[in-house]
Amino acid sequence: MMNLTPTLHDCELLDLQDPLRSLREQFELPEGVVYLDGNSLGVLPKQTPARVAHAVAHEWGHDLIKSWNTAGWFSLPQRIGDKIARLIGARPGEVVAADSTSINLFKVLAAALHNAAADHPHKKTIVSERSNFPTDLYIAEALCKERGFTLKLVEAQDIPEALTDDVSVLMLTHVNYRTGAMHNMQAITALAHAKGILTVWDLAHSAGAVPVDLHASGADFAVGCGYKYLNGGPGAPAFVWVHPQHTDRFWQPLAGWWGHAAPFAFTPDYQPAKGITRFQCGTQPILSLTALDCGLDAMLAAEPLGGMSALRQKSLALTGLFMQLVRTRLHGHGFGIATPAEEAQRGSQVSLTRTDGAYAIVQALIERGVIGDFRAGDGGQHADILRFGFTPLYVGYADVWRAADQLLQVMQSGEWQDARFSQKQAVT
Ligand SMILES: *Cc1c(COP(=O)(O)O)cnc(C)c1O
């Protein structure tokens, strides 16, 4: 299999031998669709509609306000947080599911700036990666403006030398959303700490996709997304983790009543709760949290089968297979591979580059039932990207083969050049 181009038959055999194959049965996967966009919106777990319907009809419809206690609504952010903790090397009680990734990033970045300033008041710079996800950069830019800090953006390879004496916080996304390149969290955190710099990690493309061990990595703060690899549904709540050495040093600035030590004392002054609970703000969307809980249960069903390390093995096999098929079967069709070939340096996606037509090719593929997505380049160093996420919970080897085969057909037929595939929609 390593040297010869795998056939559909080879891939079907791999599916038959796949010890994680049964996990796919937990999800609604539309007939005839190869879904390679779980890194943008995860699929629907089969149990979600019934559990959300129960929360609507019974917990809300019948039990009404009693459900804050009887159905455990009030502790849902913490209970889901404990499930997420198992995926990211955090301990019980250190994670809450709440708000959006953008909002959680604001909270932890503010806390990081505050804690760093308490120890090193002269440091006034945040370093991040130029190709970080834009919302992360926008949130950092806004906070910098407000607090008199400077945001310094560098290319990934230049991070070590950018960690100079004026730097307070290093804010990175662990797996790059465009290229799928993965940072060595432990090594970079060690470099930062050696300079007295705190680290903030965005795990949007990591949680449920690659093994993460926040404690072993020495990380300080982390946030992540509920609707990507965790299959929590559109707009699902995100999560936030803070190392216990930092949680109680600061009130995060969105100090709402759900982060209060005694929210139902209704006192006029703010007293932050101990631990991660203070990183909550206001009332959380219980129906969305219920859906997220279902996504996590589907994810944690992998634990008896080897958990994240088994999922990681399969993910690497899937992304490796796709890259191999692109290099062999799609040779000569103008694609480059932006994702690192080195296993330790890639997440769970493969990004192809092409100088023209990337958007139209993705649209033509979607019409053929292979769903990936397009991410625009910057017209310079970063090319347009055709992005394919390989979610080992429900993507199989034959799916990978079919995706590459359909891509080949799109290219051979030239159909992607049809004008209708170039009409850009609001969401790409
Ligand atoms: C998807 C993603 C987000 C999404 O943020 P929202 O607040 O949910 O819109 C943020 N950061 C990164 C790195 C992402 O990949």
Image (cartoon, rainbow, N blue to C red):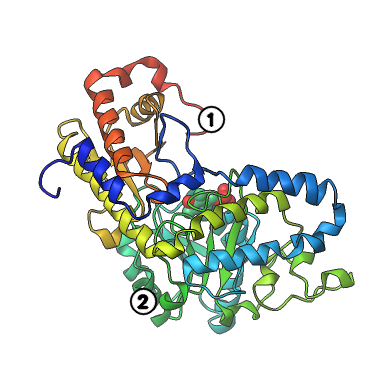
* Residue density around tag 1, few if under 14, some if 14–19, many if 20 or more, within 10 Å: few
- Give the image location of residue 197, x and y in percent: 46, 76
Q: Is residue 304 left or right of residue 312?
A: right
Mark toward the viewer: 1 or 2: 1
Q: Amino acid at mark 2?
A: Leu
Badge count = 2
Q: 92 or 45, which lies in front?
A: 45
Secondary structure category for the residue under label 1: loop
- Report if residue 215 is visible in the image: yes
Quadrant housing residue 327: top left
The residue drawn where x is 40% and y is 74% is 189
- Residue 191: give its label: 2
Quadrant housing residue 153: bottom left
- Residue 426: give its label: 1
Q: 359 or 134, which lies in front?
A: 359
Q: 14 or 74, which lies in front?
A: 14
